[in-house]
Amino acid sequence: MITGLIVPPGGGETASAPALQVTFKVTGARSRHTSVFETVVAPGFDVGAHTHQELEECFYILDGELDVFAFEPTERAGLDWTRWESADGQRPVRAGAGSFMFIPPGCPHAFRNPTGAPTRVLQTASPPPSHEQYLKAVAEILAANPDAPEQAITRLREAYDTQQLTPLRIMPVPG
């Protein structure tokens, strides 16, 4: 018999750190096509600009706001991706509840929460389960040390199809 999956509000396995909480709704253990998870992004969290060669992602903002981008910049330079621009004039934007972002393999992208409130995002990642494993490991590193050395995150990203363009950072948010 084939059965589906119903996950109640708050249900799923959670990996958390002070700056990031991920609750897995559908994992590679259930689906061979995609992982689905809800992420709570704390104020000041900046995932850093990066690309994936194999992974495809979708982001749907449920509550709150994020600064986001998903384009090839004219120059991959500097630590502040929020200043990047594409050849056709695209720039990072502030995205609120109801905004959707699709990231094909190879597309540079990033998000950060510059606001004073947490942001909830529904995300998918295909194919599973590498991004699930990566997110669990990031949460573990940040839970053990919120100021984790950049080298630890860089090594982790290299192991999970993530080419880092700017560092993951947790920045102070203006009050």
Image (cartoon, rainbow, N blue to C red):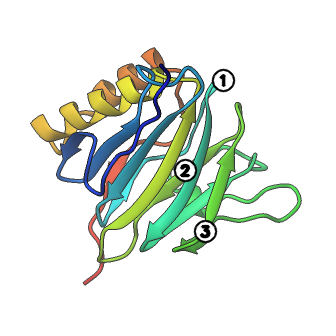
Q: How many labels does the image show?
A: 3
Q: Is residue 39 left or right of residue 146?
A: right
Which quadrant, please, contains the C terminus?
bottom left
Q: Quadrant of residue 108?
A: top right
Q: Residue 99 carries which label?
A: 3
* Viewer-closest of 122 and 84: 122
Q: Report x, y in % for residue 24.
A: 35, 39
Q: Report x, y in % for residue 18.
A: 17, 52
Q: Is mark 3 on a helix, strand or loop?
A: loop
**Amino acid under disc 1:** Gln
Q: From the image, tell me which residue sits under label 2.
A: 110
Residue at the bottom extreme of this rendering: 175
The residue sitting at 54% across, 41% down in the picture is 124
Q: Residues within 10 Å of mark 1 (few under 14, many from 20)?
A: few
Q: From the image, tell me which residue sits under label 1.
A: 53
Q: Is residue 35 left or right of residue 170?
A: right
Q: Residue 112 carries which label?
A: none
Q: Report x, y in % for residue 121.
A: 44, 58
Reply above or below: 136 against 25. above
Whichever of labels 2 and 3 marks the residue nearer the N terminus, that label is: 3
**Amino acid under disc 2:** Ala
Reply above or below: 117 against 87. below
